[in-house]
Amino acid sequence: MNWTTTLPFILDNVDGDLKITYNPWGQKFYQNGQEIKRTGFSFAGMKYKVQTTDGSDNMVSVKGNLKNGRQILFRGETINLETPLSTLEIILSLLPFLFIALVSFGMLAVTGGRFGVIDAALLGGCGAMGMQMLANMLREEKNTGIQLLYSIAVSLGATFLFVLLALIIGFF
């Protein structure tokens, strides 16, 4: 499976080819094949300075969320680069977090109520990673049966990772 997603796009009055590549570990922004370094970060997203056709610089913000995917904010306009998830796809993308929560509550019963901050952080981290990975997979696949299979497989994988990490940390 390829973990890197490439999103080419065009902006009015901006020079050349633009694209974003991202994976679970980061994001890169390119203009005419040259990587543009991030110039800032805010609630509006990661900011990049691009060259316009008249030679001046303009700020482009790239933000993303689970429902809409990556979005570009340029001169007050928001442009979706990815297909937004449907309601069913959002519910399916929440399954990894739900599976992990159910297993962690089962582990609470087995361990006599020992559930600490580290376990909660693992639950959140593994659940969020599974949710984001699954959301990206669901955007690419439109067959509902295959989406359901992906959801179950990713949920089981994220849950297995959570249990494995919880057991390893529990022994130390």
Image (cartoon, rainbow, N blue to C red):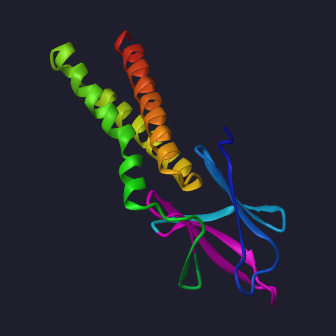
Q: Is residue 51 left or right of residue 138?
A: right
Placement of 86 over or under 148, stated as above or below? below
The part of the image, by quadrant, that contains residue 1 is top right
Q: Is residue 170 left or right of residue 63?
A: left
Q: Residue 13: image x %, image y %?
A: 74, 87
Q: Residue 129: image x %, image y %?
A: 47, 40
Placement of 165 over or under 41, stated as above or below? above
Q: Residue 92: image x %, image y %?
A: 39, 47
Q: Residue 36: image x %, image y %?
A: 74, 63
Q: Is residue 139 left or right of residue 56?
A: left
Placement of 118 over or under 72, stated as above or below? above
Part of the protein shown in magenta: 44-72
Which residue is nearer to you in this view: 92 or 131? 92
Find the residue positioned furthest to the top.
Answer: 171
Numbered label tally: 0
Q: Is residue 10 magenta?
A: no
Q: Is residue 52 magenta?
A: yes
Q: Residue at x 68, y 81 (%)?
A: 58
Q: Residue at x 72, y 76 (%)?
A: 10
Q: Residue at x 49, y 70 (%)?
A: 44
The part of the image, by quadrant, that contains residue 169 is top left
Placement of 160 over or under 45, stated as above or below? above
The part of the image, by quadrant, that contains residue 50 is bottom right
